[in-house]
Image: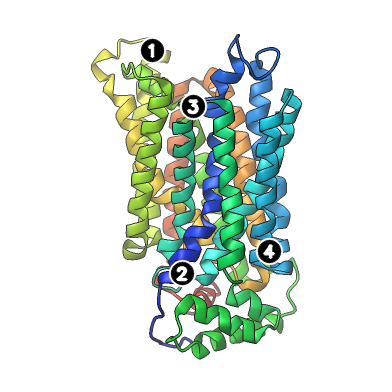
Amino acid sequence: MLHLKAEGAKFHQYMAAVIAAIGAVAIGTALAWTNPIEPILKHADTKIFTKPVTDTEFSLIGSLLTVGAVFGALPAGFLADKFGRKPIILALCFPFVLSWVLILIAPSTVFLYLARFIQGIGTGGFCGVIPMFIGEIAESSIRGTLGTFFQMFLVIGIEITYFLGLTTYTVIALVSLVFPILLFILFLALIPETAIYLMKVGQVEKAETSLRYYRGPAYNVSNELSEIQEELEAQSQKKTVFSDLWTSPANKRALIISLGLMLFQQLSGINAVIFYSNGIFVAAGSTLDPIICSIIVGAVQIVATGTSVVLVDKLGRRILLMMSDFVMAIALGFLGLYFFLKDTLHLNVQAIAFLPLLSVVVYIIMFSMGSGPIPWMMIGELFAPEVKGNATGIAVALNWSLAFVVTLSFSTLSSTLGTGITFWLFSVICLIGTLFTYLLVLETKGKPLNQIQIELAGNK
């Protein structure tokens, strides 16, 4: 039953989402760390180790984070269901702290390998549990807005690291170390567990206290608590097992949507475009330092993701996703055309030298408005409480597995097919993603979580 009720106060919901999203800043710093650190480690006169890091060693340093993220994602959701969202978010701060300490004291690349794998564990865990936490504390009217904070703060973390590229190896690591420590302190001191988890484990009084904190003292929590209880009781009668993820109609549809969104996010070629962005700036005739180019790309991501924060609860998830994928496909098509003419046909492309830069900027803007933030937000919305942990772990693990594959295969694809055809391949995938959203993705804008479950089951 869907109850109409007055909305609660919003301040503590926004505050909790911002504090939780500091974890996304920690992810962003880890993801972007290889960008400014590459010339430092590879330089012939490097002061970090006794000899420069080779291309093979650096490739391993970069890719081990994605491997660790898969291992971190799979158990994180299950553990969050068993012990609570808050304890797991707190626990995941420690891999980040340990990894930055290892980077600071590293006497050899082996320490960096270990540090990056450990960073990946924290990254994969945060990617599952933080969107889950935000999705459970937020009211329907602002759940989309708060859900986009994860991607917003992630790109802020990336931009911070790009700026830190103007400093030193030690300063980059020390500043990055601050964020997991800050998250741990603020989350421990200020943020209560979600009411949904507390109701799930039978702590009704604590759930009521939690809901009053997030909705304000004047809010009547009884209706919302009743809805949570009804949903949990209905699910408990089904004696949920792991296989319910694909045997229950609602869970199966939620899983298909989540896995599809994660697949199209990574196969859109975002990592390849970011990886190639400095080269694209050069191809467009830019004489800017690569670090400055990276800062510009990061700034574009922040502004575009900020736009998504404003629009996602106004326009809805579906329209932003379809618009994002479709325009990304067009941008990648033009980007592929430039490189096909230049590298495959060996034509003079001076007259369209602006095209790669324009294509990349448009692509990044559209990714940051839709395909970037919305999949992370929706994994916190789509799953019923009793399967949310396992389902989230699977979705996040798929995301990072694909990130690993795309990152490793881009150079091979470019050399085999040509850079132009590779970008055209990503363009076609974006078009398929547009069709996937149109046919299968449920609109969740403004809907209570229990109503989303009803619609996923096909009972509108």
Q: Amino acid at mark 3?
A: Thr
Q: Residue at x 49, y 26 (%)?
A: 167
Mark carried by residue 13: 2
Residue 326 appears in the rendering: no
x and y, in percent, of residue 344 in the image: 42, 14
CA gap between label 4 and label 1 equals 57 Å
User: Tag 1 or tag 4, which sits nearer the N-term?
Assistant: 4
**Residue position for label 3:** 167
Amino acid type of the residue that numbered disc 4 sits on in the rendered structure: Pro
**Residues marked 1 and 3 touching at CB (< 8 Å):** no
Find the distance from the CA under tag 2 to the CA under tag 1.
Answer: 55 Å
Q: Nearer the viewer, residue 341 or 402?
A: 402
3 or 2: tag closer to the N-terminus: 2
Structural distance between the alpha carbons of marks 1 and 3: 41 Å
Mark 4 in CB contact with mark 3 (< 8 angstroms) = no
The mark that comes first in sequence, 4 or 3, is: 4
